[in-house]
Amino acid sequence: MIVYPLLLMIHIVCIVLGLILLWLSKREVDFLLCAHCGYDIRGLTTRRCSECGCAISNSFQSALSTRRWQFWLGIVLIAFPILLDVTCLSFILYSLL
């Protein structure tokens, strides 16, 4: 039957993609430095560099939101095969009753 290898392939692809997205969301990136002086701007609460006073662009905020959706999409991709297994198992058990 071709269903089982296809399900296995879906499981592997989802888990690998989920792990890659989790890794991408957690890695260190260079855009968290001030473009003017190179100061590390992670953790700033204002939109100005505390070292040189230069305004921080919107790319910093968009970078943080990109990392956020990468994290949650990775979690969903890893959870999908687990939920698929639980659903299939519940249908099998229900059909045996």
Image (cartoon, rainbow, N blue to C red):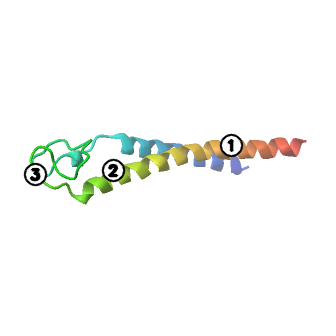
**Residue position marked by numbered label 3 in the rendering:** 36
Q: Position of residue 72 (x, y in %)?
A: 48, 48
State whether residue 55 is above or below residue 40.
Answer: below
User: Residue lying furthest bottom in this view?
Assistant: 58
Disc 3 on helix, strand or loop? loop
For the point 70% across and 42% down, the residue is: 86
Mark linked to residue 85: 1
For the point 37% across and 53% down, the residue is: 65
The three-letter amino acid code for the residue at tag 3 is: His
The three-letter amino acid code for the residue at tag 1 is: Asp
Earlier in the chain: of badge 1 and badge 3, it is 3
Mark 1: few/some/many CA within 10 Å (<14, 14-19, 20+): few
Q: Are marks 3 and 2 in contact (CB under 8 Å)?
A: no
The three-letter amino acid code for the residue at tag 2 is: Leu
Mark linked to residue 64: 2
- Residue placed most toward the observer, 6 or 63: 63
Q: Quadrant of the C terminus?
A: top right
Q: Are marks 2 and 1 in contact (CB under 8 Å)?
A: no
